[in-house]
Amino acid sequence: MAAANGQNNAPQQFVRALRRERIFRDRFDPLQNYDGFELYQRFRFDREGILFINDIVKDYIAPATGRNHSLPSFLQVLLALRFYATGKMQLCSGDNFNVDQSTVSRVIQRVTNALNRQEVVTKFISFPISAEAVRKHQADFYAVARFPGVIGAIDGTHIRILRPSINEPEFVNRKNFHSINVQIVVDANSRILDLVARWPGSAHDARILRESGLARIFEARMVPVKCHLLGDSGYPCKNWLLTPYLNPLPGQQTRYNSAHKTTRCIVERAIGQWKRRFHVLHGEIRLRPERVCKLITACGILHNIAKLLNMPQLDNDDDDEDGDDGNCDGDANSIQEDPVDGRAYRTHIVCNHF
C-alpha cells in the first residue's frame, strides 16, 4: 500500500521539480540614475515633468498591493514615456527596466487609457469659447503675420499603422499606406486646441471636420462672431474657416495668401514638433487601430503638458518635420467648390484688411 502511494506522489513531485521558481530582478530606476537632461533625452520630460505626469495618472494605474513585486506608478509612467519617445520594440524597454515584454505591453496600455480619461483630456486639450480666451488667441496669431480674427490653425496628418485585419481597405490613404488620419488644431504657440484621432486613412480632411465636434461648435455659434480658423485648400472655405485662393490675383489676394501661408504654417511646425518629441508617431505603430487612436490622443496630451512645463525641443533629432504631408502649400486633394457664404466672408476679409 505504501509503495502504491509512493507511485501516485511521484508524478506530482516531478511536476513541482520542473516548475520554475519566480525570480524577481532588481529594477532600474532612471530617476535615481539620470540627471535632468539625460531624463529628457530618454523620456522627453525631466524629473519634475515625470512626477507631474505621475500625479495625473497614479490614481488610475497604481497597483492595489505590493504583492508579486508590482510596478509602482512612476515606473509605469517611465515605461510608457520611453515607448512614446522612441517607438522601439517593447522588449527593448523591458530589458532596460528588467521587466518582461508582456508587462511592458500591459503598462503602456494602462497608462495610455489613463491619459485618455475624459477628465484628463478636457483638462489639457480644450478649444477656446470664452470671449477673453478668443481675444487672447486672436492677438497671438495677429502678431505672426497681421492676419485678423484667427483663433486656430487646422490641418490633418497621417499616422502610419500596421495593416489591420478588419476593414483593411478603409485604412489605405492616398499615399497608399495604412494610417489613421488625425485632425489637429493648434494655437499660435503650437499648443493643441483640438485633436480628432479616430478616422481611417482613407477619410478626407473635409469629412473629418464636417462630422467633428469642432464644426458643431462653430455652426451653433458657440464662439464669438468674426473669428475663424485657417486651413489649407483641402478644406472648404467657410465663414469660420478661411482657405487660400488657388489662383490669387496680384495685390490684395496675393497679400492675403502670403499672410495666410505664414500664419497657417504654425500648424505644420507644431505637427513636426509633436512627431519629433514622440517618435512613435513617425514609424509604423504595430497596434490595433483602436489602440493607436488612444495612443495618439495620449501623445497629444503629453505634448501640451510639455508646452505647459516649457520642455525644450531637441534640435539634434534625426527625423525631419512631418514627413507625410508637411508642407505649407496646401493639400493635394484641394476642394474646388467653396460655399458661397465662405467666399463672401473671405472677400470681406481681403477687402478690409489686405
Image (tube, rainbow, N blue to C red):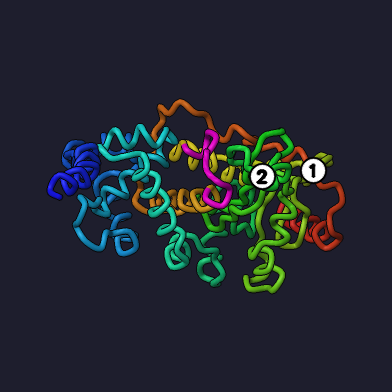
Q: Is residue 213 left or right of residue 351?
A: left
Residue 103, how many percent across, how many down? Answer: 34, 45
Residue underneath mark 2: 259
Q: Which residues are magenta?
A: 280-291
- Say if residue 31 shows up in the picture: no
Q: Which mark is residue 230?
A: none
Residue in the image at 70% along x and 39% along y: 172
Dot 1: few (<14), some (14–19), or many (≥20) neighbours within 10 Å?
some
- Amino acid carrying label 1: it is Ser
In the rendered image, residue 237, in percent from the top left (x then y), is placed at 77, 55
For the question of whether residue 318 can be seen, the reply is yes
- Quick one: label 2 or label 1, which is nearer the N terminus? 2
Q: Which of these two is toward me, 7 or 255? A: 7
At 74% from the left and 48% from the top, the residue drawn is: 204
Is 107 rendered above or below residue 115? Answer: above
Q: Position of residue 228 (x, y in %)?
A: 66, 60
Residue situated in front as seen by the camera: 243 or 33? 33
Horizontal relation, residue 90 to residue 233: left or right: left
Who's the residue at 75% across and 46% down the image? 234
Considering every residue shown, the one lying at the far left of the view is 2
Q: Position of residue 176 (x, y in %)?
A: 71, 33
Residues at marks 2 and 1, CA–CA distance in whole angstroms = 19 Å
> 228 or 29, which is in the foreground?
29
**Residue pointed to by mark 1:** 334
Q: How many marks?
A: 2
Observer-side mark, 2 or 1, equals: 1
Does 64 appear in magenta? no
Q: Residue at x 29, y 33 (%)?
A: 95
Crowding at dot 2, Cα within 10 Å, few <14 / some 14-19 / many 20+, comes out as some
Q: Depth check: give the residue in front, 163 or 342.
A: 163
Q: For mark 2, give the secondary structure.
A: helix
